[in-house]
């Protein structure tokens, strides 16, 4: 939470959703704007997606229990990586030679209920172009290309993700949390992710009085971002219960 180091999802969701059982997993990835000193890049979107498939789905067993919904949340570039991850799960589920792993991937897609994008620049943002301009081209991390305005790499992911949502039999919703306050970071002062780039291909849009970093640090349970997440979790559980009940009726 803001002003403390307390892990707010655990505390606030227990307050807002008493009696609801949930598991929260945190994922990190190298997000340096500059290449490491040794030269080779340690990760790209493909390696990150492969690692997520292995660690979240095959090892942590996320999405492997019927009627237990999955909600993914990503901040900034994390939202773009979620898109790539979901697309990778879909592609791998069609080509994986291991029958058990293939079934696990399809189970994850079936249980995916929602994706939340916190301050995600779906079409890039000028603030990140300013950052990139201060780094020699040969020293820029590969992932920075996703943050440039109207870049080709991100446009391809956006197009493929929208097509997946439209055509796949596995349906889930998307939601944007947009911070409205200016961010002071180095020589930059302004709204890092403009509203226009945050609204791309989402089913619902929420504004919250925070800067680019505070959007992940809500003040309390009244925050619009916390309320949106908790409402989605509650709705997801209700839907899963209805599906389970319908399945039991169908078998009786």
Image: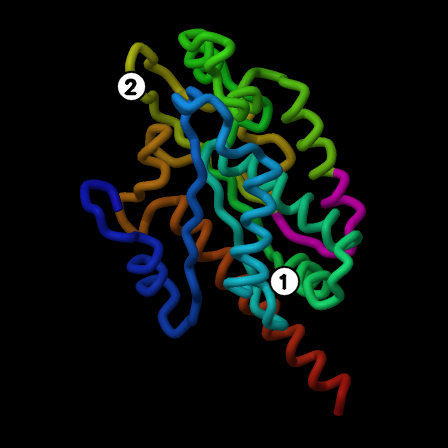
Q: Are marks 1 and 2 in contact (CB under 8 Å)?
A: no
Range of magenta residues:
163-173
Q: Would you say residue 170 sits in the magenta stretch?
A: yes
- From the image, tell me which residue sits under label 2: 184
Q: Residue at x 65, y 80 (%)?
A: 245
* Disc assigned to residue 111: 1
Is residue 136 left or right of 244 when viewed as pictured? left
Residue 83 percent coordinates (x, y): 61, 40
Residue at the location (64% across, 77% down)? 244
Relative to 123, is 9 on the left or the right? left
Q: Quadrant of residue 237?
A: bottom right
**Relative vertical location of residue 136 with respect to residue 252 in this rendering, above or below:** above
Is residue 107 found left or right of 13 in the rendered image?
right
Secondary structure beneath label 2: strand
Seen as rendered, the residue at the extreme left is: 3
Mark 2 Cα-neighbour bin, 10 Å: few <14, some 14–19, many ≥20: few
Residue at the front extreme of this rendering: 38
Which one is in front, 26 or 49?
49
Give the number of callouts. Answer: 2
Q: Position of residue 141 (x, y in %)?
A: 49, 22
Is 204 on the left or on the right of 18, as rendered? right
Q: Position of residue 47 (x, y in %)?
A: 58, 40
| Quadrant assignment for the C terminus | bottom right
Q: Secondary structure at mark 1?
A: helix
Residue 95: percent from the left, percent from the top? Answer: 79, 52
Could you say which quadrant of the image residue 150 lies in? Answer: top right
């Amino acid at each position: 939470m803001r002003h403390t180091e307390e892990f707010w999802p655990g505390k606030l969701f227990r307050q807002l959703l008493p009696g609801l059982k949930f598991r929260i997993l945190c994922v990190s990835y190298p997000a340096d704007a500059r290449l490491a000193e040794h030269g080779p890049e340690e990760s790209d979107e493909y390696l990150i997606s492969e690692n997520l498939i292995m660690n979240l789905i095959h090892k942590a067993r996320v999405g492997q229990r019927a009627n237990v919904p999955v909600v993914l949340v990503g901040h900034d570039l994390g939202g773009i990586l979620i898109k790539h991850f979901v697309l990778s799960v879909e592609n791998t589920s069609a080509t994986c030679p291991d029958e058990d792993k293939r079934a696990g991937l399809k189970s994850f897609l079936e249980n995916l209920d929602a994706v939340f994008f916190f301050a995600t620049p779906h079409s890039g943002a000028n603030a990140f172009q300013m950052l990139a301009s201060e780094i020699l081209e040969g020293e820029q991390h590969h992932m920075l290309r996703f943050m440039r305005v109207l870049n080709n790499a991100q446009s391809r992911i956006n197009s493929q993700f929208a097509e997946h949502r439209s055509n796949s039999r596995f349906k889930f919703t998307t939601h944007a949390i947009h911070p409205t306050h200016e961010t002071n970071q180095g020589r930059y002062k302004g709204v890092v992710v403009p509203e226009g780039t945050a609204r791309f291909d989402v089913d619902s849009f929420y504004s919250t009085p925070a800067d680019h970093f505070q959007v992940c640090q809500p003040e309390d349970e009244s925050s619009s971002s916390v309320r949106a997440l908790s409402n989605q979790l509650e709705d997801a559980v209700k839907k899963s219960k209805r599906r389970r009940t319908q399945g039991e009726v169908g078998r009786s």
